[in-house]
Amino acid sequence: MVGAALALAIVGACWVLYAGLRAKAAAGATAADNDKLSALLGSAPALAMVVHPDGRLELPDRLADWIGLSPPPRFLADMVTPGAGLTSEDAVTLNDAVTAAQKAGEPFALAIRPQGSSRTLTVQGQRAAGGVVVWFFDATESQARIGELLGQTAQLTDAFGALKGLIEAAPLPMWYRGPDLRLAMVNSAYVRAVEGRDARDVVGRGIELIEGSGVGGPLANAGRARDTDRPSIANAPATIEGARKMLRIHDVPLPTPPGGVAGFAIDIEELEQARGGIKRFADAQRAMLDRLSAGVAQFAADRTLTFCNEPFIRMFAMRGEWLADRPEFDRVLERMREAKRLPEVRDFPGWKAERRDWFLAATGTIEESWTLSGGSHLRVVGHPLPDGGLLLIFEDRTEQVQLASARDTLLRVRTATFDNLFEAIGVFAGDGRLQIWNNRFRQIWGFDEEFLATHPRIDALVGERSAMLASPSRASVIAELVRSAAVGRTQRGGRVAFADGRHYEFAGVPLPDGNALFTMLDISDSRRAEQALRDRNEALEAADRIKTAFVANMSYELRTPLTSIQGFAEMMGEGYAGKLPKQADGYVDAILESTARLAALVDDVLDLAESEREIELQDVDLETLAAAAAESVAPAAKRKSIDFAIEVAPSTGMVKGDPKKLREMTEHLLRHAVAGVGEKGRVLLHTDGDEKRARIVVSDDGAGMDEAAVARAFDPFAEPAVQDDSRALGLGLPLAKQFAEAHGGTIQLLSEPGAGTLITVELPR
């Protein structure tokens, strides 16, 4: 029993010990939790105040510190003190909120600012365990940040309004697309461009600014910007206000949110037209440069060749495929040197560096001359371009240099020639001043070189030396002649005699350059020779007149006894002196034939002497004239059994002339032909003509004439080649020529040995 009680007491003591230990462990855990909660509350950003139902306050000292009260208040009314605690308005608001929470259980939140403190407290409260737990948060920094954000919000709101106004007032179309690329906003310029009612109508109907043609349509550029998250630019045509224009579309992706794509369009029609005009101008300029004779090369700012014309390629023997690689300036110079189209220099790298400095030359255009090894001369002009490039122009002046050298040589030759001419030469300008003269000019007039070097006027020159002339008044004629050539562009000439007996022939000749050339030639010797010739001519004319008179007188004197002899012979032949023996009749016929020949000779000599007399013109029928001439020559042709043919063409017609002279001319031609053929030969008389001239042709098939005989056939004083009874001592052809030329006609003789003779006479109508 005692053992059971003892065991029970031990068990009870163990349980009590276990319970005590357990309670102690629980108390330690509770204390630890309290410490944690206390630490948590001490470090929490919010402090709690408990308002009991009887109005008592339970708050930590730290919260009282926030409110600015020490010691902590016991009731709500104690939270307002002069110069500390809450303001009256905040205290009333807090009291009303706590009362409402106690009675109705309504939670509350408000902001208060303790008196004399920059701290801002946020208060949140709610009913709990019959009282009200009010949490105080220090919102000083949050309120400052909120104020800052509110200010920024106001600024952004103003900026957004200004930006919206700017977009709306922008003259270029602008729009915004959502992430699905549908139009979400457009400005007024966009509405006007698509001719919509308003922005809402345009967005609602999804009216696009550009047409849907082309790859991807109007959304392609926007889609590319959205997908690549990079701005995209494209050019597209559009019809705006009835005009076709080129637009540059800019689509810019926006960050998300809100995402989407903003875009605007710039009218680049004028820019495209200007660019096209510039391109056409550049093409035209390059085409023009290709037509120039000078070589042109243009280098960019990086010193690469951007353009060269065809003359440059030919001038420096460049290859097109090499130039297509846009070689640098130095390489071009080296290639030119390889082609031996650069001057020979000792320090080529230094020379090349100097030309490289042309790109940066500040003096403007650079010009220099290159003399090449082959004797060529190049004029090189370098012009720095505003973009840092260089324009080079190469002009081949070889021909100009050669011409200049030739010109200098010609000037020296001209000067030497002028100074050694026998003529006096002076060149006067349009104002009458002497410009050029030679030594002969100075010597004739006796001027000093110093005086002529002053380039005096022509009036001063002739006035200075008028006393040297045989007639001083002739000086004004010389001055007027020079003025007429220089101003009136009229060429005139004349002669002047000097007082010492010299004679000069002068002339004024207008020159192409507006000056006048005055020349003087000494004709003193020719004047003396002319006078001697004139005297001799007068003597010859007098002798000719005496000869003509003598020949005419002798002809008449010879004709008188011939007439008597012919008459007595005819009387004897008729038997007036009695019947003559038959043999005597032959003698009489011989006398008559000889007298006829002598009479014809006398007539020819008389005609030759009187050939210079004027003829009387009248209408002559060549057909009748040819028949009469043929009839007079027919007996002689018949005696030689000659085939005598006459051809008169219908175009023969009439001519103006002396019928007697023309008939004698034709007879002389026929007698010459008859005399030139042998027995049973052939003679042809042919006449024809046209509107302006008539023609008489006499031909035969005789032995012909050699060149010497043809050359002297028309010479009246040459020995006749054929001594024949019918040739009249060779005066027939000379008389025929004189008669033809007296009528303004021509005569031509063609003959070769063994081929006969052809004589053609042409007479004007």
Image (tube, grey):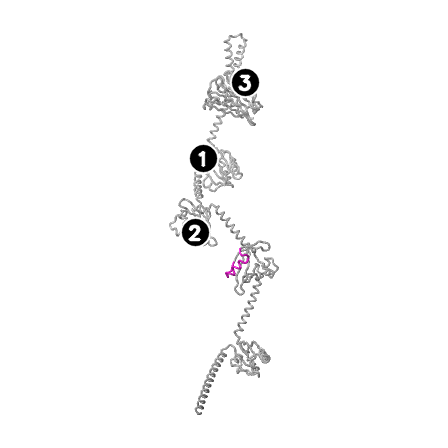
- The location of residue 213, given as percent across then percent down, is 55, 55
> Which residue position is annotated with label 1?
422
> Which residue position is annotated with label 3?
631
User: Label 1, label 2: how many angstroms apart (C-alpha)?
Assistant: 65 Å
Image position of 729 with respect to 408: above or below? above
User: Label 2, label 3: how many angstroms apart (C-alpha)?
Assistant: 102 Å
Segment colored magenta: 215-232
Q: Which mark is residue 327?
A: 2
Image position of 567 with respect to 750: above or below? above
In this view, the residue farthest toward the front is 1
Image side of residue 80 versus residue 424, left or right: right
Image position of 406 with respect to 594: above or below? below
Please tell me whether mark 2 sits on a helix, a strand or a loop: loop
In this view, the residue farthest toward the right is 197
Residue 656 in sight: no
Q: Using a 10 Å C-alpha cutoff, classify the residue at mark 2 as few (fewer than 14 neighbours), some (14 to 19) or many (20 or more).
A: some
- Pointers 2 and 3 in contact (C-beta within 8 Å): no
Label located before the other in sequence (1 or 2): 2
Going by the numbered disc 3, the residue's amino acid type is Glu
Asked if the magenta segment contains residue 226, the reply would be yes
User: Label 1, label 3: how many angstroms apart (C-alpha)?
Assistant: 66 Å
Going by the numbered disc 1, the residue's amino acid type is Phe
Label located before the other in sequence (1 or 3): 1
| Residue found at x 45% / y 35% | 422
- The location of residue 690, given as percent across then percent down, is 56, 27
Instruction: Indicate the quadrant where residue 91 lies.
Output: bottom right
